[in-house]
């Protein structure tokens, strides 16, 4: 089961003192990570099975779908946390900002400030 938590992170940028930023994270337990991994693996594995019966295409389709299925499923299974939203004072422009993390981001993560476009690295304190 996924658990939503709030965590205070250290935000740092080049040549400025670091600040604290609050982030909402989703923590995935082993069963949830397995469910997420199978959610991407099974459709791609099915596409590989369907490709098996298509002449010529099976030479590319079967190994291609299988490789992509294993790589994406491994990535999802290995993701223990996901950063959902980030709010706090930017260490560069020192204004309150709402950062937009990519959907599959994990800690530590580097984001761009929407106000001053500086790179801000977020890591646990
Ligand atoms: Zn900024």
Image (cartoon, grey):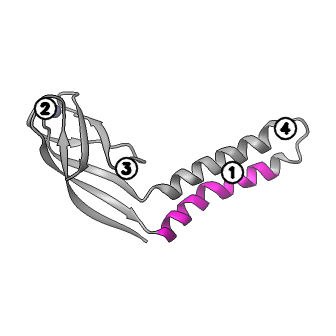
Residue at image coords 58%, 48%: 72
Q: Which mark is residue 106?
A: 3
Mark 2–mark 1 distance (CA, rounded to whole Å) = 43 Å
Labels 4 and 2 touching (C-beta < 8 A): no
| Secondary element type, mark 1 | helix
Compared with 122, 115 (above or below) is above
Q: Is residue 48 magenta?
A: yes
Numbered disc total = 4
Choose the circle earlier in sequence order: 2 or 1: 1
The tag on residue 59 is: 4
Which quarter holds ligand 1?
top left
Q: Is residue 34 above or below residue 65?
A: below
- Between the C-alphas of marks 4 and 2, the distance is 52 Å
Query: Cβ(mark 4) to ligand 1 < 8 Å?
Result: no
Question: Magenta segment, which residues?
Answer: 30-49
Q: Position of residue 104 (x, y in %)?
A: 43, 48
Above or below — where is 110 with respect to 45? above
Give me the C-alpha separation between circle 4 and circle 1.
Answer: 16 Å
Disc 1 crowd, CA 10 A, few/some/many (<14, 14-19, 20+): many
Q: In terms of sequence position, does the residue under pointer 4 or pointer 2 come before the other? A: 4
The residue labelled by disc 1 is 44
**First of labels 3, 2 by sequence position:** 2
* Local crowd size for mark 4, using a 10 Å CA cut-off: few (<14), some (14–19), many (≥20): few
* Relative horizontal placement of residue 62, taking residue 108 as reference (left or right): right
Element type at mark 3: loop
Residue at 64%, 51% in the rendered image = 70
Q: Earlier in the sequence, mark 4 or mark 1?
A: 1
The residue under label 2 is 92
Q: CA distance from mark 1 to mark 3?
A: 24 Å
Q: Which numbered dot is residue 70? A: none
Give the number of the mark in front: 1 or 3: 3
- SS state under label 2: loop
């Amino acid at each position: 089961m996924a658990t939503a938590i709030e965590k205070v992170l250290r935000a740092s940028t080049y040549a400025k003192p670091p600040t604290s930023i609050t982030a909402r994270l989703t923590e995935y337990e082993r069963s949830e990570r397995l469910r997420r991994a199978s959610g991407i693996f099974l459709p791609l594995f099915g596409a590989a099975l369907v490709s098996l019966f298509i002449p010529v295409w099976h030479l590319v389709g079967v190994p291609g779908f299988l490789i992509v299925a294993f790589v994406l499923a491994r990535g999802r299974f290995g993701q223990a946390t996901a950063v959902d939203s980030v709010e706090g004072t930017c260490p560069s422009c020192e204004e309150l900002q709402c950062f937009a993390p990519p959907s599959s981001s994990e800690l530590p993560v580097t984001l761009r400030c929407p106000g001053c476009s500086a790179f801000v690295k977020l890591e646990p304190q």
